[in-house]
Image (cartoon, grey):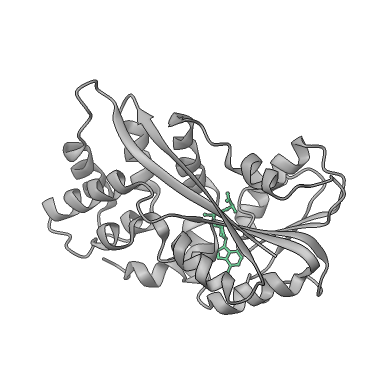
Amino acid sequence: MANSDAYMITDRDYLRTRQYRTDANLAARQSIYRFQRPRVDLPAAVLGLAGLTGMEAIADVGCGNGVYLAALARRGHAGAAIGVDLSPGMLRAARAAAGQARLVVGDAAALPIRDGAADVTLAATMLHHVPDRQAAARELRRVTRDGGQVLAVLNGTGHLAELCDLVTRAAADIGLADVVWAASEGLTGGLSLDEGEELLGGVFGSVQRHDFRAELELPRPEPVLEYIASMRSTQGVDDPQRLVDAASRHIRPAPDGVVRIRTWTGCLVCR
Ligand SMILES: C[S@@+](CC[C@H](N)C(=O)[O-])C[C@H]1O[C@@H](n2cnc3c(N)ncnc32)[C@H](O)[C@@H]1O
């Protein structure tokens, strides 16, 4: 591999200039959830846990292409909202969806937000990207007012297990032994829901966990292959298409022709 995967997960330069230069990779991964059964509308479910009145000041850290800000706008949220992301390209992609929210380039480990400014702070599927997670957890606490809440979303161990297994088999087939990340870490990115619970438990007085488990039911393999092509591990090998082609040979639909892949995501509500 060109870079070790563990390095790339938290490499700000890689994240800003390649993986999240635009929202194309994230959008390829988001689009696979149209095959989820039962369908979990994660932004709606997460915001539902916050018990919002509609007037809260909200900070969305690592807001990406703005799916949580868009969900807030759809709810008619009237309080101030700010989206912060490391990548200017992601913020450009977020602009159309993000309603009235301010969008600011910034790092979760040193947020451009004053102490206690947010009633509710979101950190959805992003803490695994921050090299100093303790610093990020402290920043989430700092920018959230006393009595407010932080909602962190992370993947459970076993999220997309079948997809990880497929990538591992495909990589072994073409002699890419380094792509063992899939078997060892799954798609938690190296910070699982369990680990996140422990991390945030060290910073907040209480952490309540909500798990969302479902399954992708894919009638054809193409969305799986597009997802694999979007992943940093695939993009880190010398010939990504060769790995995608190997995955296409190894994909095993069930006898009914459907490819089934488990999903497991959770939200940690921290107060
Ligand atoms: C997997 S995406 C999640 C986006 C969005 N929160 C969602 O759930 O759809 C991770 C996002 O975190 C951003 N990110 C990565 N490291 C960051 C950091 N240190 N500070 C702020 N944002 C970061 C990336 O640019 C990317 O937009």
Quarter-of-image position of residue 58: bottom right
Whether residue 184 is visible, yes or no, is yes
Look at the image and tell me in which quarter the C terminus lies: bottom right
Quarter-of-image position of residue 179: bottom left
Ligand 1's image quarter is bottom right
179 to 70, vertically: above or below:
below
* Image x and y of residue 171, in percent: 19, 54
* Image x and y of residue 256, in percent: 24, 20
Whether residue 96 is visible, yes or no, is no
Q: Is residue 194 left or right of residue 229?
A: right
Rendered residue at 29%/57% (across/down): 182
* Image x and y of residue 57, in percent: 83, 57
| Count of numbered circles on the image | 0
Rendered residue at 60%/79% (across/down): 135
Rendered residue at 14%/55% (across/down): 172
Closer to the camera, 65 or 208? 208
Closer to the camera, 49 or 152? 49
Q: Is residue 82 left or right of residue 178?
A: right
43 to 127, vertically: above or below:
above
Rendered residue at 51%/71% (across/down): 198
Q: Is residue 106 left or right of residue 266?
A: right
Look at the image and tell me in which quarter the N terminus lies: bottom left
* Image x and y of residue 177, in percent: 16, 63
220 to 46, vertically: above or below:
above
